[in-house]
Amino acid sequence: MKKTAFVLSPITAIVSLLLLMNTNLMEGKWSENLRNRLQRNLLRNGNFEQGLEGWSTEHHWYARGEGLSQWEVDEKVVKSGKRSLKVIGKNNRGIAIQDLRPPFPVCQVSGWLKCENLKGHAWIFIEFIDAQGKWLAGVVVGEVTGTTDWTFVSKEVTMPPDAVVFRVDLLTTEPNNGIAWFDDISVVPLLPPSDGKPPAPPKFQVKPIEGEDGALQINWDLPSEDVIAVQIFVEPKPFSSVDNLMPRAVLQRHSRSFILRGLKVTDFIHIGLVAVDVDGLKSKPEVQKCQVKDLRPPEPVFVEMFVVRHGAKRSAVKGVDHNATPLRFVANYEQVHLRWQPHPFDDDIVAFELLRRNGEKVQTVKRFDANTKQATLPLLSPVDTLAVVAVDEARNKSQPQWVSLIANSTNVLDAGFETGENVRLQTVKGPVTLAPEGFNPTQLPSNLSELLKP
């Protein structure tokens, strides 16, 4: 079973580190320190002193026509510091992008713009994208056009409720041969004033995941506005406080779900969610008792079938392995002998069921314990379609792999071949004939390979 991995952003890493401390350390200067850390420029290299680090510019989808506008670091034309970012039109347009996940939905976005002989506009533009990558909305923070000296632009921007990504775009809107500059771009969370009260605990639901064992999915509602993170605790016993407990995960406020994997099946566990606000105050845990279930069915059973008459084995029907398609064998015998084996990874099998299908009707012929892996049965009708399924401890059943035996006559020669039919394996990809069409032998040829000739 693979372990779930998640990556913490710098902001969440700060919060996570502080949240591992005792609650009373979050008061006073610790609360002030957390606020100071959150109310900083979230952009990496917003002043371009490290060149293009943190920004991506090779976005050919944005170009109109061939090529792209050229992005450069300018050390001569700057608003402050030693460098600014410059885009040269080259009869096209360009865009530089940096994605953020702010710890708070309201941010102040600002920056300085300058342009020379620019057709269209130079923008600071914010886009909002949800967890599935769907574009939700966009906001123009500010713009310049033509020939304009350094201009400061700023706007308070609020993320939509479903937004996860806060995308910062520096761009030119039209193909042009001018130049635009950007400098001192910043995105700073606007935290609400402290009310000194802990937030309400998140309301959440827990459900097992179909097709998996030892896995639970937790979904919760959008937390209150001042919440910056959600802690998830998993404990074997009930708890009413999270002091001295280690969270299983710490997630940013935009997260709405988390999957716990690798849990022991049949165990009851206690899951608690705690909301953390901008002052580091924690809610009381909302705790639910949950049972870990096994909803992963066993793999299809490997089946080997032999056709039998008067108790003597005649010929083997190819088995159905775990990746193969069902086979149909044309034969005339009165008994079938089945042998089966579960998938080696399925170590919790408690029983096997032998199924028979007649048209749309499926019935259980017999049930066997986990130690029984073979059976001999009479042909129940001229057309028998059989399958063996495995049943595990949680009563999950494997998918049946059907094998058909077709009996058209009872005339069987001593050599074991039918007088009216050729021996044939039938798969969903077509028949495989083991003797030529129209060739009905009354005795075995001296060279058995003759049977395989087309």
Image (tube, rainbow, N blue to C red):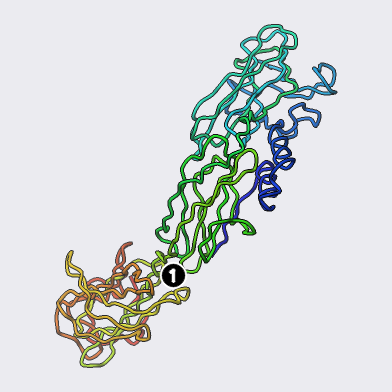
Quadrant in the rendering for residue 281: top right
Q: Image check: 410 left or right of 101?
A: left
Q: Nearer the viewer, residue 112 or 225?
A: 225
Read off the residue under disc 1: 266
Q: Residues within 10 Å of mark 1 (few under 14, many from 20)?
A: some
Residue at image x 70%, y 26%?
186
Quadrant in the rendering for residue 397: bottom left
* Residue 104 coordinates in the image, percent (x, y): 60, 34
Quarter of the figure that contains the C terminus: bottom left
For residue 224, above or below residue 19: above
Residue at image x 26%, y 92%?
312
For residue 95, above or below residue 364: above
Badge 1 marks a residue whose secondary structure is loop
Q: Nearer the viewer, residue 454 or 91?
A: 91
For residue 194, above or below residue 185: below
Residue at image x 17%, y 66%?
359
Quadrant in the rendering for residue 365: bottom left
* Residue 238 coordinates in the image, percent (x, y): 50, 63
Q: How many marks?
A: 1
Q: Image check: 115 left or right of 351?
A: right
Q: Nearer the viewer, residue 80 or 155?
A: 155
Q: Image check: 355 left or right of 300?
A: left
In the image, what residue type sits under mark 1? Thr
Q: Image check: 414 left or right of 302?
A: left
* Residue 228 coordinates in the image, percent (x, y): 60, 40
Residue at image x 84%, y 21%?
75
For residue 148, above or below residue 332: above
* Residue 249 coordinates in the image, percent (x, y): 59, 53
